[in-house]
Image (cartoon, rainbow, N blue to C red):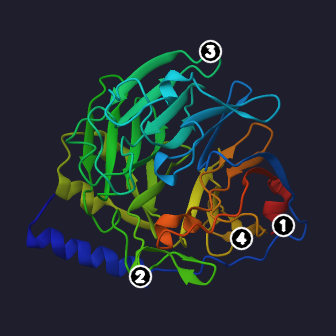
């Protein structure tokens, strides 16, 4: 992490630019034709915060620290039950066991451009805890057969004490991950398996205390009178692959050139200087970007789904009280957006040990506005 005064001054200027350049995230009206929400599945044993669609299957996952008994990674059966995936053994880790071929605590699922399923295992069984040995990893799986294609271990210098490896996106031979715990991006070379931490504690990756997460008219707190701060969390790659968009859960978002991120010879100073403000988004649960560059994101405070088009115009798709902490969505081939409803703010960890969860957990899908609607509105 750079310590020179010149870099600190750049951080301050960058943060000032973000604040001064902020624009309203609610510039456009809600589409006149209401979108419909469909409940796809429910669960009382898995607090799912991830969904992925691949090879005709629906996969879900949830982190261990939520305290529910469901599998770390599951596949929806024909009866809409959740079966362990790829098998029971991968989901059977217990403290003290070797974690190399077990899921410790899964935070994200994502379908890569080649159709394979990727599992992001934080390796941290407790909220805010340290990764267990060999626990932090990425697992690439054939979604049709459950065959493990490759395991990418994240060494202790990458997934560090205090890290929370959060989500993943792909761009050619590289993948990008966010560390929501220790405020950094992780760049992974998919061919060599080598990973690097970049933009550590940069203004673009660090949560700002003045932007708290507000749910049900209350600030979400990690401890009494301490707002929950989640560092760099959501991320997306532009359709042409030239930009990585990212930001803390609380916003705002920035962008960085992927050409510089991918190049290990670029200095930390040069990379930091290339980061630009991109979008002043509110605290979100998750996002998905389509092939046209439209960003869909869940607005936590409003129990809503919004979209941001390529020109930067933002409008509401729908609001529904059931969209409570609607987490990381996935776009289906038929144009529907699948969203796991996690209710994370209602967990006992954020209420002095008292659960406010309203079972069951919902997995929903929403029919997105048509292209004509987006142009009209």
Label 1: how many residues lie within 10 Å, few (<14), some (14-19) or many (20+)? Answer: few
Q: Nearer the viewer, residue 66 or 289?
A: 66
Q: Is residue 303 above or below residue 87?
A: below
Q: Residue furthest left?
A: 4
Tag 4 and tag 2, C-beta contact below 8 Å: no
**Residue, disc 4:** 315
Mark nearest the camera among 2 and 1 is 2
Give x and y (percent) for residue 79: 82, 32
Q: SS class of the residue under badge 2?
A: helix
Marks 1 and 4, the one that precedes in the sequence: 4
Count up the numbered dots: 4
**Residue, disc 2:** 19
In the picture, measured across the screen, residue 31 lies left or right of residue 28, that is right
Q: SS class of the residue under badge 4?
A: strand
Marks 1 and 3, the one that precedes in the sequence: 3
Q: Give how far apart the Cα atoms at labels 1 and 3 are.
A: 43 Å
Tag 4 and tag 3, C-beta contact below 8 Å: no
Residue found 46% across the figure and 73% down from its top: 352
Label 2: how many residues lie within 10 Å, few (<14), some (14-19) or many (20+)? Answer: few
Mark nearest the camera among 2 and 3 is 3
**Residue, disc 1:** 376
Q: Give how far apart the Cα atoms at labels 2 and 1 are.
A: 30 Å
């Amino acid at each position: 992490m750079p310590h020179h005064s010149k870099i600190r001054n750049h951080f301050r200027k960058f943060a000032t630019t973000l604040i001064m350049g902020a624009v309203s995230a609610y510039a456009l009206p809600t589409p006149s034709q209401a979108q419909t929400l469909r409940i796809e599945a429910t669960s009382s044993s898995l607090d799912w915060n991830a969904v992925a669609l691949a090879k005709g299957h629906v996969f879900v996952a949830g982190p261990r620290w939520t305290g529910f008994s469901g599998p770390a990674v599951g596949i929806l059966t024909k009866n809409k039950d959740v079966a362990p995936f790829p098998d029971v053994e991968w989901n059977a880790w217990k403290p003290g066991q070797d974690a190399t071929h077990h899921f410790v605590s899964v935070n994200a699922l994502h379908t890569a451009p080649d159709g394979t399923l990727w599992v992001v295992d934080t390796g941290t069984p407790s909220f805010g805890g340290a990764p267990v040995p060999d626990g932090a990893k990425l697992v690439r799986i054939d979604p049709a057969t459950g065959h493990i294609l490759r395991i990418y271990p994240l060494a202790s210098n990458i997934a560090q004490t205090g890290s929370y490896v959060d989500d993943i996106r792909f761009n050619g031979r590289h993948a990008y991950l966010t560390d929501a715990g220790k405020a950094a991006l992780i760049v992974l070379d998919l061919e060599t398996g080598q990973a690097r931490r970049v933009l550590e504690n940069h203004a673009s990756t660090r949560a700002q205390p003045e932007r708290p997460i507000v749910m049900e008219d209350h600030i979400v707190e990690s401890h009494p009178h301490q707002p929950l701060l989640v560092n760099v969390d959501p991320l997306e790659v532009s359709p042409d692959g030239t930009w990585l968009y990212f930001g803390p859960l609380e916003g705002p978002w920035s962008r960085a050139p992927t050409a510089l991120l991918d190049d290990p010879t670029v200095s930390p100073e040069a990379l930091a200087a290339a980061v630009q403000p991109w979008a002043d988004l509110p605290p979100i649960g998750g996002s998905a970007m389509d092939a046209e560059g439209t960003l869909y994101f869940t607005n936590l405070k409003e129990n809503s789904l919004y979209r941001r088009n390529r020109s930067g115009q933002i409008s509401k798709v729908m609001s529904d009280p059931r969209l409570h902490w609607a987490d990381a969505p996935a776009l289906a081939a038929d144009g529907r957006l699948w969203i796991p409803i996690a209710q994370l703010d209602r967990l006992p960890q954020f209420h002095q040990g008292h659960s406010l969860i309203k079972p069951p957990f919902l997995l929903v899908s929403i029919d997105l506005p048509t292209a004509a609607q987006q142009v009209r509105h």
